Structure formats: C-alpha cells, structure tokens
Amino acid sequence: MVKRPMPAQRRSKHLCADAGYRGQSALATIEAHGYIPHVVDRHKETEIKRHNPKKKARRWVVEVCHSWFNRFRKLPVRYEKLECSFVALNHLAAAIIAFRKVKLTISIIYG
C-alpha cells in the first residue's frame, strides 16, 4: 500500500444527506468524522424551489439510478433463475436508459 502525500492545504469535507440523517446521533457521527453536514428535508427544498424555480433539488446519482431501474418491473422482482439472465436484463435496461437520454433531432419511429 502506497501512502499518499498530504495536501498542503486541507479542504473541508462536505456531506450532503437526506432527512434520514437529521437525528442528533447521526449529526454527531458526521461531525465526529470531520464532515460538514448538509441535511435538507423535502419541505425546505420545495420552499427553496418555490422562491427560485430554476434551482433544482440535488439528488444522489444512486437514488436516481435505482428509480430508473425500478421502472423495469421485471428487475426488482427477479424471476430469473440464472444469474447470467438477470445480468443480461440489467445490461439491457442500462442500454435502454442510456438510449433514452440521447437527444435526437429526428423521430426514430416516424423518420
């Protein structure tokens, strides 16, 4: 294991968390590890969005990815017996998700 050199200037570490980490014990643990907690509940986010509609709520990439995959109803239930079939369906879902994110100038269906 190679030890990394310490940076000359110590940057502050920020931790963005959801409302599940608003408890005193969770905040104490976050601060004990040297993080600056940023915990915003959904009511405050909607209030901020009402004042500034262009500002989007910050969500974790993992949570968004899970919600995209959960739209494929066969994946969360996992009926497949073989692991290779399940992995193939996950790859297919990821390809469909990525394809939907591509902005096209023409319609694929109508040409």
Image: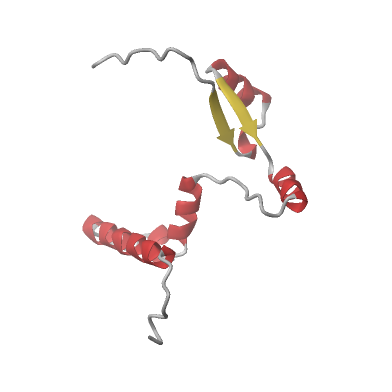
Q: Is residue 105 above or below residue 42?
A: below
Q: Is residue 50 above or below residue 4?
A: below
Q: Which residue is more in the foreground, 79 or 37? A: 37
Q: Is residue 79 above or below residue 26?
A: below
State which quarter of the image contains the N terminus.
top left
State which quarter of the image contains the C terminus.
bottom left
Quarter of the image for residue 58 reads top right
Quarter of the image for residue 76 reads bottom left
Whether residue 72 is visible: no
Q: Is 43 displayed left or right of 67 in the figure?
A: right
Residue 53 point in image, percent of width and height: 71, 54
Q: Is residue 86 above or below residue 38?
A: below
Q: Which residue is more in the foreground, 53 or 31? A: 53
Whether residue 44 is visible: yes
Q: Which residue is more in the foreground, 87 or 32? A: 32
Q: Is 52 displayed left or right of 18 in the figure?
A: right
Quarter of the image for residue 93 reads bottom left
**Colour style of the rendered protein structure:** secondary structure
Q: Residue at x 62, y 20 (%)?
A: 28
Q: Residue at x 67, y 24 (%)?
A: 24
Residue 59 point in image, percent of width and height: 56, 46
Q: Residue at x 47, y 64 (%)?
A: 71
Q: Residue at x 37, y 66 (%)?
A: 99
